[in-house]
Amino acid sequence: MAVLVGKKAPYFEADAVINGAFEEKFSLQQFIGKKHVVFFFYPLDFTFVCPTEIIAFQDKMEAFEKRNVAVVGCSIDSKFSHWAWVNTPREQGGIQGVKYPLVSDLTKTISANYDVLAGEFTYNEDGEMEFNGDPVAYRGLFLIDKQGVVRHQIVNDLPLGRSIDEALRMIDALQHFEENGEVCPANWKQGEDAMMATHEGVSSYLTNH
């Protein structure tokens, strides 16, 4: 599994569905210099755990917008599958009301470049290409700063849903560091004391806690 933290987020252009409408050549580049980005992968449309995460992100959208953060989802489904799911009522297993972009990674190249594809293409002894594993993305999440650099990533196995509140906490920690130059200790939350990344700053923090 690749560690992308500290590196430029892999570039892509792809079809997406945004607020129920198709968009061609969608790219994260539009957010460079403007917004932080939470870019997350999920395995498949019309499944069980995936809609709970996707809807949870939408339900917290005001909190992301307050922090000037764009949320973007991605799976290996087609744009038509995304569109159908977004236009299916929630009581029928859909995600109606989700407005943020859902990217179509039909070729699986985006998942591969972010190294979250749950398997790989190989050749068998007859020289035929085959896929070993699950041809879907793990539940990867990448926090990307305004310069397009990955600052945080987590990757969950397929059955394990993520915490939206933890994603918000990591955004708060990154933005606090960017704005104040202070580093954030374990379980830090917005409004709590942080510390300077110096011997004196750490000593002061420990003395007061």
Image (cartoon, grey):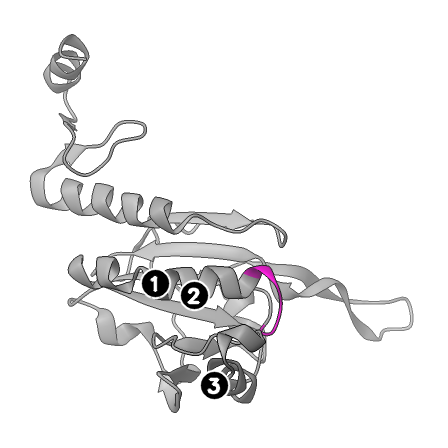
Q: Does 194 sit above or below residue 41?
A: above
Instruction: Tell which residue pokes out farthest to the front in this image.
Output: 91
Residue 96, position in %: x, y? 44, 78
Q: Please tell me which residue lies in front, 78 or 25.
A: 78
Label drawn at residue 87: 3
Assess whether mark 2 and mark 3 are in contact (beta carbons under 8 angstroms). no
Write the start and end of the magenta stretch as one range.
45-49
Q: Amino acid at mark 1?
A: Asp
Q: Does 103 sit above or below residue 1?
A: below
Specify the quadrant that holds the C terminus.
Answer: top left
Residue 146, position in %: x, y? 20, 61
Whether the magenta-drawn stretch holds residue 176 is answered as no
Residue beneath the point at 43% across and 76% down:
102
- Alpha-carbon neighbours of circle 2 within 10 Å: few (<14), some, or many (≥20)? some
Residue 79, position in %: x, y? 51, 86
Q: CA distance from mark 3 to mark 2?
A: 13 Å
- Alpha-carbon neighbours of circle 3 within 10 Å: few (<14), some, or many (≥20)? some
Q: CA distance from mark 1 to mark 2?
A: 6 Å
Assess whether mark 2 and mark 1 are in contact (beta carbons under 8 angstroms). yes
Residue pointed to by mark 2 = 55
Residue pointed to by mark 1 = 59
Q: Is residue 109 left or right of residue 134?
A: left
Q: Secondary structure at mark 3?
A: loop
Q: Amino acid at mark 3?
A: Asn
Q: Is residue 90 left or right of residue 23?
A: right
Q: Earlier in the sequence, mark 3 or mark 2?
A: 2
Residue beneath the point at 57% across and 77% down:
92
Q: Secondary structure at mark 1?
A: helix
Q: Earlier in the sequence, mark 3 or mark 1?
A: 1
Q: Please tell me which residue lies in front, 144 or 163.
A: 163
Residue beneath the point at 52% across and 83% down:
88
